[in-house]
Image (cartoon, rainbow, N blue to C red):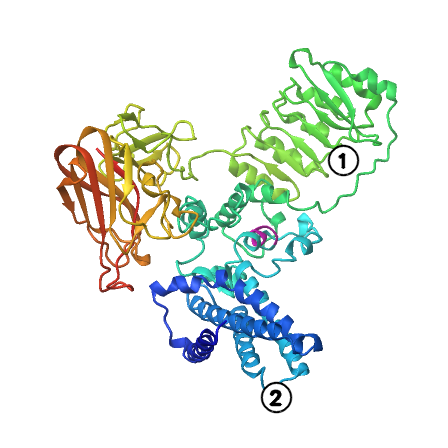
């Protein structure tokens, strides 16, 4: 580094130290304008440079007074230059970090630790650089200063990583693997089912130290408070809850949660969150406090170990092996419940050959039978006397048998019976009310598709609290569910010839109603989709799904674009914005539509953009074509300075050098606070036969109310349509 360059760098370092001190003293009064925010957002990118450079410089500084290096001019000169570059890059990083910290979502103790450890590293490095040639600066001071600087560097890096990725990010995979599993009877719905979902998928951005959207999911009070956009959920109304609405947004939407690039929620996790909100969240409720048939309990139960996992021990001897083999045939199976267990499970098949004798033949193993499946067999009440001989019976399946319920008294003597299934039988409330209390060990009774009403089953449940009565689902129309929106099945939203509109819905019997005039469809007046709609021009389809007994779906909007004449060759005459290059001119006719959040590299691939010059495209056709309109599909997001062009000009003619102006359009400008959108800017004119078309989009000047007033707006175009 020459003396002149080094002198300038040292002056820049001194100025940086003063500027950073100014930022720290007046931090509470500083507001970072929108156009400066990208500088702050480069902090995570740039910080790696000072980390590496300062780490190397401090390591060399520790050995600077070693006899081997003290007289080595190259070593001393290289170290001085390296340290200067490292401190300067640290200054830039600190400024970027202070800018970034002013954005929404950064607060808390962790931010303060990160900020002050970084600032301390910078000023300590400055002190080392400016003092290293003083007489008092000797080996002990150099080593102490270098070690302290490395300490600050590690601290700043650690706290920054916690801010970005959350606490315990590095050691999480190994420290969580040994977590003690929770027993089902001890599990809390929030603490052990819902909170782990938040912990894994949400808290890295919504914690006291990083309050994205002013939302903190780290404790109950903060969850109930909600965030900048309002309450997190409406108890009992998942469809109206912000939590579920953001989760169900399309992945390309800016507000979809978790953001694209983060680990997404699984379908089971989404279901658990929806059921939790629907159940009117109680943060102290146990999983086992939910009804046995509750969907949330059933799904959550698989996450926990059983309260007791001890293998059952039977006090009877095993049956004779030859007897068990003899009793097995094509219509009856007799099998051991488990290896080394004397208990037997019996299943009968084929309704047409059933008789009570098939049960009586099991008398030789009546002591060992603990499970008997008579599902769909023509079992009569009288046959239950024979069933009662199986003294150790624990599970009895009488689903869809011919019993009436009056014979259940014969089973009351089975002191080990804990599961009884009576679905599809003729049992009545009176039968069960009179007899069920005599079953001392019974835990569950299944009553699907019986004559019992829900109130009757609830009465049985109230009178017999130790028994779970499983009624199944009965659609009484009193608790309708909202349909999901219709889906479009067309392979592309861009067409050059008339195309049939293809809409569908995954639920059978759904009626789809739609409009093409921009109005929202209703369930009465709007046309019913019947697979007969042909699209011949650019059309916006708005559709909703309806079905009796269901709430109508939310609105689905599908934009179809007609592109009749694709140019044979295209070229951009002026450069594109460095960030929004896409695939150049060919991106404008590749039939790939862009989405929102174009400033993120993952989404910028389909957008071409200009800011400091016009977008000028020359299109050429090998054979003349007759055109009457040109449309540009653009993005508008006023908050980030993405505006429509100030004007769009269409030029055409037979020669590249002799073009005439065919149309000029000045698009409507957005107002402050207007939501972002994707829209067309369409230029129409009298039909013209042309070989060349020149399309010019001129950036506008940002209005007075905008943070970047007076600057050119960013124009983003992803597709052009010539018709």
Q: Earlier in the sequence, mark 2 or mark 1?
A: 2
- Distance from label 2 to label 1 (Cα)? 93 Å
Residue at label 1?
A: 416
Q: Residues within 10 Å of mark 1 (few under 14, many from 20)?
A: some
Q: Can residue 193 be found in the magenta stretch?
A: yes
Q: Which residue is mark 2?
A: 135
- Taking depth in this image into account, of 80 and 115 the one nearest to the observer is 80
Q: Can you tell which of label 2 and label 1 is closer to the viewer?
A: 2
Q: Nearer the viewer, residue 711 or 399?
A: 711
Per the rendering, the mark at residue 424 is none
Where, by quadrant of the figure, is residue 494 drawn? top left
Give the percent coordinates (x, y) of residue 470: 59, 36
Q: Is residue 632 above or below residue 188?
A: above
At 82% across and 20% down in the image, what residue appears? Answer: 363
Left or right of 642? Residue 173 is right
**Which of the two residues, 194 or 253, is positioned nearer the viewer here?**
253
Q: Residue at x 64, y 30 (%)?
A: 421
Residue 136 found in image quarter: bottom right
Q: Element at badge 1?
A: loop
Q: Which residues are magenta?
A: 192-197
Please say if 123 is above or below 477.
below
Give the x, y percent position of residue 648: 19, 47
Q: Height in image: 15 above or below 510? A: below
Q: Quick one: 2 or 397, which is closer to the camera?
A: 2
- Quadrant, the C terminus: top left
**Residue with the most extreme bottom position:** 135
């Amino acid at each position: 580094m020459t003396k002149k360059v080094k002198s300038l760098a040292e002056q820049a370092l001194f100025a940086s130290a003063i500027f950073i001190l100014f930022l720290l003293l007046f931090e509470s009064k500083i507001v970072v304008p929108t156009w400066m925010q990208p500088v702050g957002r480069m902090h995570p990118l740039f910080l790696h440079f000072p980390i590496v450079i300062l780490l190397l410089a401090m390591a060399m500084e520790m050995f600077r007074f070693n006899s081997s290096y003290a007289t080595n001019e190259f070593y001393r000169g290289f170290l001085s230059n390296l340290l200067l570059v490292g401190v300067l890059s640290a200054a830039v990083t600190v400024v970027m970090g202070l800018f970034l910290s002013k954005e929404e979502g950064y607060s808390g103790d962790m931010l303060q630790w990160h900020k002050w450890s970084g600032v301390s590293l910078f000023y300590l490095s400055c002190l080392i650089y400016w003092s290293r040639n003083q007489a008092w600066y000797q080996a002990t001071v150099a080593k102490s200063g270098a070690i302290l600087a490395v300490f600050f560097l590690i601290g700043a890096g650690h706290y920054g990583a916690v801010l970005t990725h959350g606490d315990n990010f590095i050691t999480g995979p190994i420290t969580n693997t040994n977590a003690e599993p929770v027993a089902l009877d001890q599990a809390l719905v929030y603490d052990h089912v819902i909170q782990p979902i938040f912990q894994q998928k949400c808290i890295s951005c919504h914690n006291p130290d990083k309050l994205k959207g002013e939302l903190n999911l780290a404790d109950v009070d903060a969850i109930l408070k909600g965030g900048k956009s309002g309450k997190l959920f409406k108890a009992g109304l998942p469809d109206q809850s912000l939590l579920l609405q953001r989760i169900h947004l399309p992945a390309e939407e800016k507000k979809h949660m978790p953001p694209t690039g983060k680990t997404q929620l699984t379908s089971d996790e989404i279901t658990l969150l929806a059921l939790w909100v629907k159940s009117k969240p109680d943060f102290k409720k146990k999983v086992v406090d939910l009804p046995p048939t509750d969907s949330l309990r059933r799904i959550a139960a698989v996450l926990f170990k059983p309260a007791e996992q001890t293998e059952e021990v039977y006090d009877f001897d095993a049956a004779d092996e030859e007897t068990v083999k003899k009793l097995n045939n094509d219509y009856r199976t007799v099998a051991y419940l488990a290896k080394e267990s004397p208990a037997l499970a019996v299943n009968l098949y084929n309704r047409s050959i059933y008789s009570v004798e098939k049960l009586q033949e099991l008398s030789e193993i009546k002591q060992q039978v603990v499970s008997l499946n008579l599902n769909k067999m023509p079992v009569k009440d009288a046959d239950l006397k024979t069933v009662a001989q199986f003294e150790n019976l624990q599970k009895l399946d009488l689903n869809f048998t011919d019993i009436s319920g009056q014979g259940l008294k014969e089973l009351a003597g089975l002191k080990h019976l804990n599961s009884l299934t009576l679905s599809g039988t003729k049992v009545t409330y009176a039968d069960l009310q009179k007899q069920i209390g005599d079953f001392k060990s019974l835990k569950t009774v299944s009553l699907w598709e019986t004559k019992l009403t829900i109130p009757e089953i609830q009465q049985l449940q109230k009178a017999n609290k130790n028994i779970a009565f499983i009624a199944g689902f009965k659609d009484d129309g009193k608790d309708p569910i909202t349909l999901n929106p219709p889906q479009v099945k067309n392979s592309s939203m861009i067409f050059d010839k008339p195309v049939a509109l293809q809409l569908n819905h995954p639920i059978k019997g759904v009626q789809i109603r739609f409009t093409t005039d921009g109005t929202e469809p209703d369930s009465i007046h709007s046309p019913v989709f019947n697979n007969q709609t042909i699209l011949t021009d650019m059309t916006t389809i708005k559709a909703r799904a309806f079905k009796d007994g269901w709430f109508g779906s939310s609105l689905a909007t599908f934009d179809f674009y007609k592109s009749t004449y694709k140019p044979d060759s295209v070229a951009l005459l002026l450069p594109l914005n460095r960030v929004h290059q896409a695939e150049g001119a060919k991106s404008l006719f590749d039939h790939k539509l862009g989405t929102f959040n174009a400033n993120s590299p993952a989404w910028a691939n389909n957008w071409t953009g200009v800011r400091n010059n016009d977008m000028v495209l020359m299109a050429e056709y090998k054979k003349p074509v007759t055109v009457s309109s040109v449309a540009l599909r653009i993005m508008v997001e006023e908050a980030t300075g993405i505006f429509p062009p100030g004007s769009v000009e269409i030029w055409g003619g037979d020669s590249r050098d002799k073009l005439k102006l065919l149309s000029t359009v000045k698009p409507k400008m957005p107002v402050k606070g207007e939501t972002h959108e994707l829209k067309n800017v369409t230029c129409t004119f009298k039909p013209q036969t042309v070989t060349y078309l020149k399309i010019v989009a001129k950036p506008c000047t940002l209005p007075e109310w905008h943070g970047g007033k007076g600057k050119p707006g960013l124009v983003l175009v992803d597709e052009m349509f010539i018709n």
